[in-house]
Amino acid sequence: MNASNGRGVRASYRRASHGGVWRWLLGALLALAALESRAQTINDVVVIPQGTDTVVRITFNATVRFLRQQPADASTLHRITFDVVAADETVINQTSEESKRLAAAGSVPEFTLTYVPGRGRRVRELTLQLRAAAAILARQGPSSRAIDIVFAGRGDQAPPPVAEPPTVASPASPAAVAPLAAPSLLGTVEVESRARELMALAREALAARRYEAAIDQFNRLLLLPPNSLSQEGQELVGLAWERAGDMRRARVEYELYLRLFPQSEGAQRVAQRLASLEGAPAGAAATAGAGVAAAAAPASASARANRFTGNIAQYYFGGRARSQSLVNLASGIDQATLTKTTESALVTSVDLGARYATADSETRAVVRGTASRNLVASSHNTSLLNAAYLDYKRNESGLAVRLGRQSSISGGLLGLFDGVSATYPVTTGWKVDLMGGVPANRLVSAPSERLLAAMVEADGIFDRWGGNVYIIDQTTEGIANRRAVGVETRYSDDLLSMYSLVDYDVLFRKVNAVSLQGSFQAPAQTTVTVLVDSRKAPSLQMTNALISSGATSLKQLLQMQTLDEIRASAEATSAQAKQALVSLSRPITAKWQLAMDLRYSAIGALPAVGNFEATPATGAQYGATLQLTGSNLYSPRDINNFNLSVLKSPFFKGAQLSYSNLTGLRDNDITLEPSLRYYTQRDTQGVRLNRISPGMRMSYRLSRRASVLGESIVEHSKTDGPSNSDTTNSIFFYVGYRYELF
């Protein structure tokens, strides 16, 4: 269960009179409860203070693995690249983009997080737009379904700017406290400008763990005449020394802060950090804490406010449809192409949320749904419910209960379900999760389905290690459909994140999935990612046998086949999907980043299933990608990607050259994303394919709440073979709007 952290700040909500809002959300939840399901890729976005840092945690409805971020320095525009390791087919073939706008939290500026689906591609991208420039550190989160964005030194209670601190510290003698003359009126603007510049450089170095550089920049800032960033700089220079491992210097800087700013809002926090250092006097925290207790009270009260958020978006999709597949594994080249099927559809997406928190508990309501009206006579309309649940958590006991359509707790290959889940901490570091209901994310509809799952989770039993053991039992009309046991292990610290999964199906007596993933933040801002994964796709279930049988239930199918025959038929409908990845990325200059991906994949054959096309076995595919990224080359906010990819399989060889750009104009009110891809392929039959695909995506923020956006892809393909030649021109596009309701 994705329950909120007790210290977490759900910053995505605004204040409101909650009576009408809760009735409205409850009504929307009931109205959508009967809809079919389709998972969005992003499950939740929360803001969590961690010491003097702030973490934006993004949780997904898929297993993901962080790859890289651009740029590495401070900017208002960032791009985060990640792999979709495994996901349900509804996530793989998602068409509508997602956007989350979060209000400012502490000193973290307001930001918008946008996800544009790249159907047919495993490598996906998030775009982060900040209202004020900041350096970030993106990394894998504490699980295989989370990515963290760290704002270093920007904790929820980070010190606010002050007008004129009376004194500053000297790097040569940090313990010496000497009053400095106030700057003249003529120099004030220059001092503030220089202070902001140094603070940005220092934060960037701190986020990149270049502590010596961070300390140098903080000390330069503290040498300036008193300014609005002096107080914050004094605290952060102590943090930099602490993270660098020099506790003596950190203690000196913290003690100086308490002498300079004894009544400030950050004094209690600094005193607590001082007390945590070896040999720090315990009385320091108590003395400073007494001075700021009253100031802290209003902040606690405001955190208990009722808040809500929501947006509505509508898009018109036209041109040629994109291809769909049950398996989303790629070898580094986007081989997905447009189909010959005409697409004309109006898609409406709604995302609503509310939160009511007290000192003892937190209650949330979430409703997300998508409705598609197809304007082509041969197509049909669909209404798709992504999430609709009420969530209640007790702060003291940690008991959490969620009711409605929801994602599974942790991984566990559970998918979406309609029902109830509960989490209860039984002792320090141990908790029990229970889930029950009806599977909601189904390839095949079967009558009277039931799901039960139980999980025992452990966190912090060993330093930074955690994991769980789970059991899953699914039935239809009382007949066992899926019965599995699994174990997940996790390790996470500031530099290394590791995750492993083994899922064994008792009914099929086969391993359903095994996965080992890891991300490491090496020196010089180098990111190393490793992945080895093998799984059945789609997951093993007895009801998979209904796909090609024509029967409507297992009970009916059992009248025509034996149980062993049904099991064999179901297993034949799941391909064995194997993949491996080694990825490295690092900045080579202040504006340029180099990355390399080496991939392996092999996917078994799959039959046609509903709207999904049949796919032959791929054989062993080997791919390599070299990417050069330039950031802020011609403006304060631009990201330029140059890619060269090669692919080799038993049936063909391919190569792709591509360029993509992301540029923000007018403080990111306008974003432009042109792209150009050239792909060439030659197979073993002597058939050569050449395809060029220019594209453009654009968004324009009309106001703080309203935006219009659209995308168009033109595809020109030419195929030459021994016996025929063919040229195809296709176009795919969508246009729409998004409106923030609150």
Image: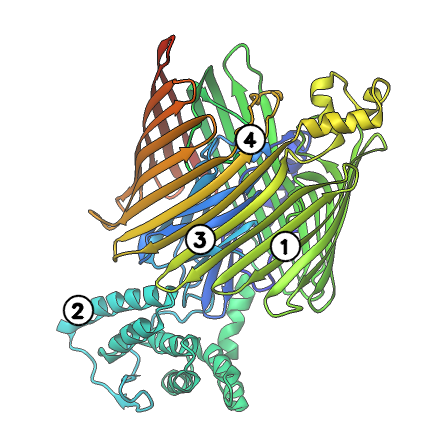
Q: Which sits earlier in the primary sequence, circle 2 or circle 3?
A: 3
Give the total number of marks visible in the rendering: 4
Residue with the mark numbered 4: 370
**Residue 83 spot, x, y in % from top left:** 48, 44
Q: Which residue is mark 1?
A: 3
- The amino acid type, in three-letter code, at marker 4 is Thr
**Residue 290 to residue 590: above or below:** below
Give residue 226's position: percent from left, percent from top: 25, 78
Q: At which x and y percent is residue 439?
A: 71, 36
Instruction: Judge whether residue 6 can be spotted in this image.
Output: yes
- SS at badge 2: helix
Q: In front: 596, or 486?
A: 596
Q: Are marks 1 and 3 in contact (CB under 8 Å)?
A: no
Secondary element type, mark 1: loop
Amino acid on which the number 3 mark rests in the picture? Ala
Q: Label 2: which residue?
A: 190
Above or below, comparing residue 327 to residue 135 in the picture: above
Rendered location of residue 118, percent (x, y): 44, 34
Mark 2: amino acid = Glu
State the separation of the CA atoms marked 1 and 3.
20 Å
Whether 167 is drawn above or below 613: the answer is below
Mark closest to the chain's N terminus, 1 or 3: 1
Q: Quadrant of residue 137?
A: bottom left
Q: Nearer the viewer, residue 407 or 580?
A: 580
Side (left or right) of 582 relative to 663: right
Which residue is identified by label 3?
103
The local crowd at label 4, few if under 14, some if 14 to 19, many if 20 or more residues have their Cα within 10 Å, is many
Q: Amino acid at mark 1?
A: Ala
